[in-house]
Image (spheres, rainbow, N blue to C red):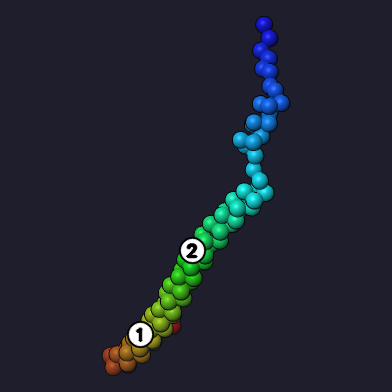
């Protein structure tokens, strides 16, 4: 018993007609995919710009906070020195 399938030229032609893609079809599909990718890239670019802006804000606030903290530490050191002098405390460094 042989499991052969007879395929005629008409069957092949019918298959090709049903599954054929023209250059225009392919061009349209490629353009659609390209447009979708470009749209997604634009969204990602906007998100990256927003993230960069937020990071810049955080960096600026961190610098301001660090500068303020350094000033506070210096002021506290000066006050400690004054208090030590008033109390007659000698500190060895």
Q: Residue 59 sits in which quadrant?
A: bottom left
> Which mark is nearer the camera, 1 or 2?
2
Answer few, some or many: residues within 10 Å of disc 1's Cα (few below 14, many 20 plus, some between 14 and 19): few
Q: Is residue 36 left or right of residue 17?
A: left
What's the residue at 56%, 59% (across, down)?
Answer: 35
Residue furthest to the top in view is: 1
Against 9, is 28 above or below? below
Where does residue 9 sit, x and y in percent of width and height? 71, 26
Q: Is residue 26 left or right of residue 69?
A: right
Q: Quadrant of the N terminus?
A: top right
Which one is nearer the viewer's eye here, 47 or 76?
47
Of the numbered discs in the image, which one, if any, rests on residue 62? none
Where does residue 44 sit, x and y in percent of width and height? 50, 63
Q: Is residue 51 left or right of residue 79?
A: right
Against 93, is 40 above or below? above
Which one is nearer the viewer's eye here, 69 or 9?
9
Which one is nearer the viewer's eye here, 33 or 77?
33
Against 38, is 82 above or below? below
Residue furthest to the front in view is: 10
Q: Earlier in the sequence, mark 1 or mark 2?
A: 2
Helix, strand or loop under label 2: helix
Where does residue 30 sit, x and y in percent of width and height? 61, 53
What's the residue at 35%, 85% (across, down)?
Answer: 72
Q: Quadrant of the C terminus?
A: bottom left
Q: Residue 31 sits in which quadrant?
A: bottom right
Task: Judge whether residue 37 can be spotted in this image.
Answer: no
What's the residue at 68%, 9% (across, down)?
Answer: 2
Of the numbered discs in the image, which one, if any, rests on residue 72? 1
Of the numbered discs in the image, which one, if any, rests on residue 43? 2
Helix, strand or loop under label 1: helix
């Amino acid at each position: 018993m042989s499991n052969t399938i007879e395929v005629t030229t008409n069957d092949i032609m019918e298959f090709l007609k049903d599954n054929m893609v023209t250059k225009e079809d392919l061009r349209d599909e490629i353009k659609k995919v390209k447009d979708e990718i470009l749209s997604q890239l634009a969204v990602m670019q906007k998100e990256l710009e927003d993230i960069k802006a937020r990071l810049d804000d955080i960096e600026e606030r961190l610098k301001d906070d660090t500068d303020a903290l350094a000033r506070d530490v210096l002021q506290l050191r000066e006050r400690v020195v004054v208090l030590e002098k008033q109390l007659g405390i000698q500190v060895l460094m």
